[in-house]
Amino acid sequence: MKRYKFFNIKTFFFITICFGVIIIAYNYWDNNRVIVKNEKIVIQNLPEEFEGFTFLQISDLHGKKFGSNQDKLLRLINSLNYDCVLFTGDMNKYEISDATSSEAVLDIIKGINNNTLMYWVDGNTGPFACETIDGSYTGELTEIGNKLESMGVNVLLLPEKIEKNGEYIWLVPELCRTELEMQYFSIDEMNEQYKKISMFGKNLEKWYEQLNGNKKIKIRVNHFPLQANLSNGERKDLGYLDYDLSISGHYHGGQIRIPFYGALYIPSPTSGMNGYFPRQEEVEGLNNIDGLQQYVSAGLGASASISFLNFRLFNSPEINLITLSGNK
């Protein structure tokens, strides 16, 4: 009887170790491959000229390298068909913006063949293309921002048009309160803060007027997803525009995912239980927030905010092809 118990204990530990080795080996392989997620998004009143218009979204790289000079990732990117590239923030591991620390993303930009239209928005880690004062954009570019522009990347400081055959759609960076700010400021404090921003200042109301009264398609491009707990009316009260689509990243798909369940946590203070055990539909992919379509990329890298969890688990790195359509 004792021998039987001893055999069971040894077998249990042997199986446990083998299982652990398999998980580690799988995770290493999975963290070093990239998948392509395709999403067709139907937008009412989309101009015919933009039927099938496709964005390639690259998000949350966090300094991750896929081969020498990103050659593995670039082979995949250069095999795809798309019209416009969107870099949606957090390309460096830390809050650093010099060229050396930004090598991982600069290698991608250098190696992209279809580079006619490329746009950039900052995240909450570097590199930061936009100068800030007390966390507010000044409208000036940093050294790395100027470098990006010299490489053909448009830093999205203010709304910009993409035009095709006389028609156009708007790409709009965040012109109002971000989720990050809502953790720290009341609405009145945030309104007062925005009045002081030299970048917008007197021009902020002009942009709101122009865009809210404009029936053209407006696509919000921002690192941070819109708050899933806000109704359409609450969004308008906070100054959000009547977007037709929001494209963002930040959540990493939860980074650590449990098979058959999903993400245990996202960095979203407005999600249920302060981000723990979020609604899975808001973590990644396309979801609907009270009539607004929002697409959230799970991105490519892992956050270093918790050093011993600086990896993805059961969560393949991804780039995203987002195709616009006026037809259901």
Image: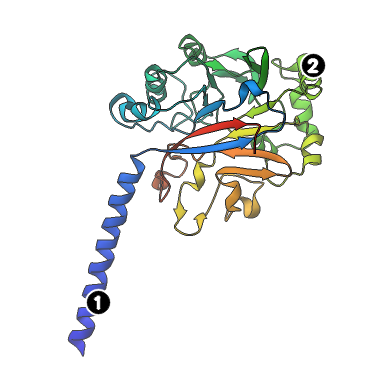
Whole-number angstrom distance, CA of label 1 to CA of label 2: 72 Å
Q: Nearer the viewer, residue 80 or 290?
A: 80
Mark 1 falls on what kind of element?
helix
Position of 223 with respect to 307 (left or right) is right
Mark 2 falls on what kind of element?
helix
Of the 4 image quadrants, the one containing the C terminus is: top right
Residue identified by numbered label 1: 9
Q: Nearer the viewer, residue 291 or 99?
A: 291
**Quarter of the image where one finds residue 20:** bottom left
Residue identified by numbered label 2: 206
Q: Nearer the viewer, residue 121 or 280?
A: 280
Position of 191 with respect to 153 (left or right) is right
**Quarter of the image where one finds residue 70:** top left
Q: Mark 1 vs mark 2: which is more N-terminal?
A: 1
Determine crowd level at label 2: few under 14, some 14-19, many 20+ residues with C-alpha closer than 10 A.
few
Q: Nearer the viewer, residue 56 or 237?
A: 56
Q: Which mark is residue 133?
A: none
- Please report the residue visible at 62 percent of the width from the left and 32 percent of the height from the top: 325
Position of 41 with respect to 309 (left or right) is right
